[in-house]
Image (cartoon, rainbow, N blue to C red):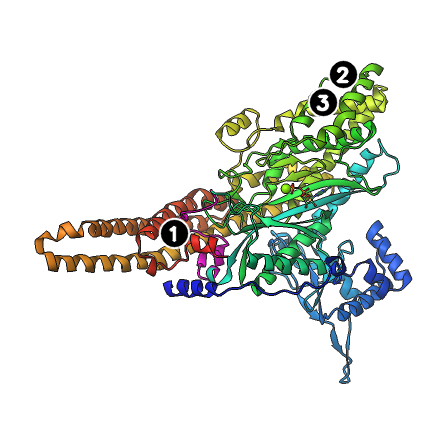
Amino acid sequence: MAILRFNALKETLHRTPVKIQEEERRSDLFGRNVFNKKAMRQYLTKESYDSLINVIDKGHKIDRSLADNISTGMKEWAISKGATNYTHWFQPLTGSTAEKHDAFFDTYGDGEAMERFSGSQLVQQEPDASSLPHGGIRNTFEARGYTAWDPSSPAFVWGPTLCIPTIFVSYTGEALDYKTPLLRSVSALDKAATDVVRYFDKKVNKVITTLGWEQEYFLVDSALASTRPDLMMSGRTLLGHSPAKGQQLDDHYFGSIPSRVLSYMRDLERECMLLGIPVKTRHNEVAPNQFELAPIFEEVNLAVDHNSLLMDVMDKVAERHHFKVLFHEKPFQGVNGSGKHNNWSLATDTGSNLLSPGKTPMKNMRFLTFFINTIKAFYENEEIIRATIASASNDHRLGANEAPPAVMSVFIGSQLTKVLNELEKVTDGKLSPQEKTELKLNVVGKIPEILLDNTDRNRTSPFAFTGNKFELRAVGSTANCADPMTVLNAIVAKQLIEFKTEVDGLISDKKMKKDDAIFNVLREYIKSSNKIRFEGDGYGEAWEIEAKKRGLSNYRNTPEALKAKISKKAIDLFAELNIMNEREVKARYEIEIEDYSKHIQIEGRVLGDIARNHIIPTAIKYQNVLIKNVKGLKEIYGSEFKNQAKQQMNLIETISEHIEQINEKVEQMIEERKKANALKDPTKMAFAYCDQVKPYFDDIRYHCDKLELLVDNEIWPMTKYRELLFTK
Ligand code: ADP
Ligand code: MG
């Protein structure tokens, strides 16, 4: 193994940036491999084109002949882009994407061949995907699962394959993927938000959700990564001593991008352009070899597809550049982990961002309405939000002494805090004309000016308002954004429905004017949700104590946090809005809780193997060298040898102690794993893995890392942190 490490290191010495072609303008490349409106116009009849646009924009149904026409055009277009195969591309609950390729190629049966792709093949498929997670949904009824075309996300050609974005549902129509509930949440929020926005603007007929994600990741040389079984099997290093230098000098953050990495990024961006993923920013992140990439925001369903696709593309492009991408939230102990900030907002079909303050008091009333309702929704449902971002890997960020913390709170900045404090003082009941004028002039009217010079930025808050959008920062870097976006859409939709009911109630029962009614309801919302607002430093004990006083939850691990997923509140929320029924909600919980146990189980196995099969034998080898040395000294110096051999003998003993500890802890961990595996109830099993198995990881690691410091570097088998993190 040590040989493997040194061979890999040698390989990295000769690496040079891979040459990439970038002769064309990005704007020319953009969307070239996407079946977008331009391609549709070219490959579809005028009627089919118009009908398809109606399907996309208005949700019209697709009939057989339309489907046939579209599939034929799509096939011809795809072949012109070099595609030979097609696939229904979907996002099952495994967290990655799934595809099953079929060839366009077909035979007539008389020796002649053709390319064929029918309407029915476009619209629906039945992949044999019986081993994808379903949380029991497919056991109970029909075992079949179907993929169905989602025309709202355009088809694209990637490599030799036409990829058709689809939803994945059971025979009974229940969601087996991330996209289905997301689409349902989008329409729930559209309805609720449109109803509310019409208090301010009757021209609005549709509200869409927008998402701009920011993807953080690490790049490690692929040769080095392949020497680490822990990285390969669990996505993170399970042991490894901290290097002398980490991120303390802050010399990597926003520094110049290493040339091999830059070449990778440019290659990646070129691929993204072709696929219509509007990537815009790239930079170094805080930790060594950590980077970030962000696109221009898009409609949420498309943005989610683009993030999932991006993660696949990143892996593929990395191969060409001899990198391995680490998406894990915490691949290395002691340096920052990775997240995926989800910038979320609402936009109308008339082109307004509903979370952007405007130039008139009316626009600002609208802004405040959506702003305050979002805060209220977040407060009321903070536990469900916490649950949606929980995973074994994200546990290393949330509540593990790294921002953001496990306590959910909202940051809005001091200027908007002042505005809300003013609004909290609004008179109960009807407002006097003077008060209204005063409010409109000096509170509501002042917002745009305020925000422009609002410079306070908070880096630790899990949910921060950043000028014209909320940024959910607690999402993990491996996560599919669909789940947190579904929850955010759902809770805000529910909140807006309540808001509308209350405002309408005041107008009809109390004969209030619309503005008065809105001010009155908002005032109560500000009061009742102020506990969630926190402007200070988001991690540390002081905030945890304060948060507890405020009654906010603080779930430090996934099994605890996931409980809220199947709370009555969550089940009712999704059912009321027709986003998921109880079975769908429970199925997801079951998949995630099992996923948690599996992750810890794998990590436990890998750590046990490495400790016993790699670390202990290496330590013994080195110990034997020391023993030989001591024996030699004894031969030369006779009874005086101890003067010369003191340090060596100490080392021999220390090594034995560490070996003993490692063996003992691995043994105990295996016992605990056995007990955990015997538990029938998946929740109990997850708690056992969390509370009984996982604590051994730190113990075992501690002794292995100590040995790393003692044992001869020449024979150490595991590629070291300094090599993984600083090879460029
Ligand atoms: P930051 O300072 O956090 O980097 P940026 O303004 O660069 O802020 O935006 C970060 C992300 O937010 C980008 O992906 C961007 O597209 C996205 N974003 C900007 N406006 C919106 C919006 N209205 N809705 C959703 N996302 C948005
Ligand atoms: Mg950001």
Residue 602 visible in image: no
What is the C-alpha distance between the residues marked 1 and 2? 63 Å
Q: Amino acid at mark 1?
A: Ile
What is the C-alpha distance between the residues marked 3 and 1? 54 Å
Q: Specify the label residue 670 is tagged with.
A: 1
Judging depth in this view, the residue of 304 and 668 nearest the camera is 304
Tell me the crowding category of disc 1: few under 14, some 14 to 19, or many 20 or more residues within 10 angstroms, Cα based: some
Name the front one of labels 1 and 2: 2
Res. 310 image quadrant: bottom right
Q: Quadrant of the N terminus?
A: bottom left
Q: Amino acid at mark 3?
A: Glu
Q: Nearer the N terminus, badge 2 or badge 3?
A: 2
Q: Please check the rendered image and state whether residue 232 is part of the magenta-colored stretch, yes or no.
A: yes
Q: Residue at x 74, y 37 (%)?
A: 493
Image spot of residue 639 (x, y percent): 8, 53
Q: Locate residue 101 relative to residue 597 in the image: left or right.
A: right
Residue corresponding to mark 3: 524
Q: Residue at x 81, y 21 (%)?
A: 516
Magenta-drawn segment: 225-248
Q: Secondary structure at mark 1?
A: helix
Res. 163 image quadrant: bottom right
Q: Secondary structure at mark 2?
A: loop
Picture quadrant of ligand 1: top right
Q: Amino acid at mark 2?
A: Asp
Determine if the C-beta at disc 3 is less than 8 A from ligand 1: no
Q: Nearer the N terminus, badge 1 or badge 2?
A: 2
Residue 300 visible in image: yes
